Amino acid sequence: MSQWHPQTEQLVEFAAGTCHTGISVAISVHLHYCPECRKRLSELESASAVLFEHQKPIAVSDNLFASVLSEIQQGKVTESVKPAAPARATSRYPKALSSLIPGTLEELEWRSPMKNLKVTHLMTDESGLIVGLHHMKAGGRVPNHQHRGDEISVVLEGGFSDELGTYGPGDFIFRTEEDVHSPQADAHEDCLMLSVVSAPVKLTGALGWLINPFLKA
Amino acid sequence: MSAANVISILSSKKARTMTEPNPAAEQWADALELVAKRQDTAAFERLFKHFAPLIKAFALSSGLHKQGDHLPDELVQEVMLAIWRKSASYDRRKAAASTWIFTIARNQRIDMLRRLSKYRGDVSADEIWDLESDTELFGEIRQSRVQEHVRIGLYELPVDQRQVMAKVFLEDKSHQEVADEMGLPLGTVKSRVRLAMKKMKLSLEAYDL
């Protein structure tokens, strides 16, 4: 079971749908592994529903029900008898990554900015947060480095440790830009992580992600 | 199963016998099941009459109308269609009807706001927020207990906490955006939310469970 969790504020913003997409993806991946945080989320959603029901109702236009009903009766909406489509059964990864990792890891374009580390870029969100994967070789240590901006890592496979702790699948690790660390992958297994970093202001060009997140190697 | 889980289920059973059933909440769960099983349009109309004006209020609270007068009603329409479409996946043992409907409204609002912005997202809200379903059997009991605490707590909240809760939970604003809007330090907004959550007996950290 995961030992490192999002902060309360982050989970509240996730429940409300107000955090940036990059952070939402990271939290969703953590939730996939963490039944405790799924319970917290369901509490927050229950609480939101109470607040939702306490709103002052605002009348909708008179013909809206008729137009919803006619859309249903025209047969455009026909799925109600079958349950929602199941997530792609073949994927090894949480649902939040299913569009971002459509095929195998080998099909993604990898770069190696530092010794023992490979990175790939998955998306840049609306706020400039860069979502990618990090892959560390079993037993490999990444040289001491500092991040520019905050970084969230969520372990997907394997594990690693650094000066502040030991992490396994699902762990949600939040580092601010003051943190200097040199992570080392577990000896017996490669470590795959989701990484979300804020883009440095100067590197917003097409190749920015090649240099970020490890600017000061 | 760990000892902690057993205890929480036992206390949930106790809660079931002690808590009065909430007829309003049951009514909406019944209606959703009628829609799923029989495509019952009368039940759907009851859901519409109750929830459509709430969804519209939810749309307005995020300022959707400022981007187009027709958008709040359009959101209501999309949410109601999604309720019809997804009703078969509603499971009353896992969630209160109002919670399930709130999550659909939230996801549809996220997708609509993204479509309106220049940003073309790579990931849909349902991919991020529709998590693999938990098989927790007493989810409904747990939720009705949570909702009871929140209802009671809500009336006891001082105005400043209540205001911040509504903004953070419903109005599509991050803690930082609420702080900017109200001219308060971020820490003040965070602590008001935490105080309110405490009064509503919501877990603040994972180990509170």
Image: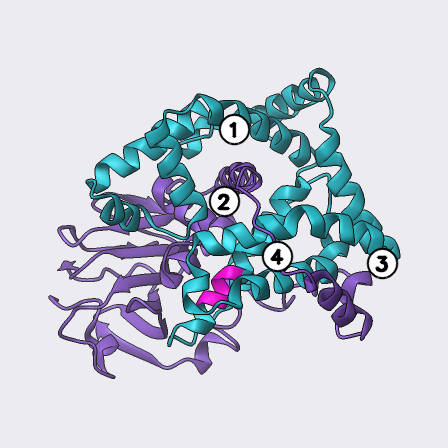
Chain colours: A purple, B cyan
Disc 2 marks which amino acid?
A: Cys
Q: Is residue A112 left or right of residue B91?
A: left
Q: Which residues are magenta?
A: B109-113
**Disc number lying in front (1 or 4):** 4
The reply to whether label 2 and label 3 mark residues of one chain is: no
Q: B63 or B198, which is in the foreground?
A: B63
Q: Chain of mark 2?
A: A
Q: Nearer the viewer, mark 3 or mark 4?
A: 4
Residue A18 visible in rendering: yes
**Proximity of marks 2 and 3: CB atoms separated by less than 8 Å:** no
**Label 4: few (<14), some (14–19) or many (≥20) C-alpha neighbours in 10 Å:** many
Neighbour tally class for label 3: few under 14, some 14-19, many 20 plus, Cα within 10 Å: many
Tell me which residue sits at (58%, 48%) in the image: B54
Mark number for residue B150?
1
Could you say which is closer to the camera, residue A204 or residue A102? A204
**What secondary structure predominates along the stretch shown in magenta?**
helix
Q: Are marks 3 and 1 in contact (CB under 8 Å)?
A: no
Q: Are marks 3 and 4 in contact (CB under 8 Å)?
A: no
Q: Amino acid at mark 1?
A: Val
Residue type highlighted by circle 4: Val
Q: Which mark is residue B39?
A: 3
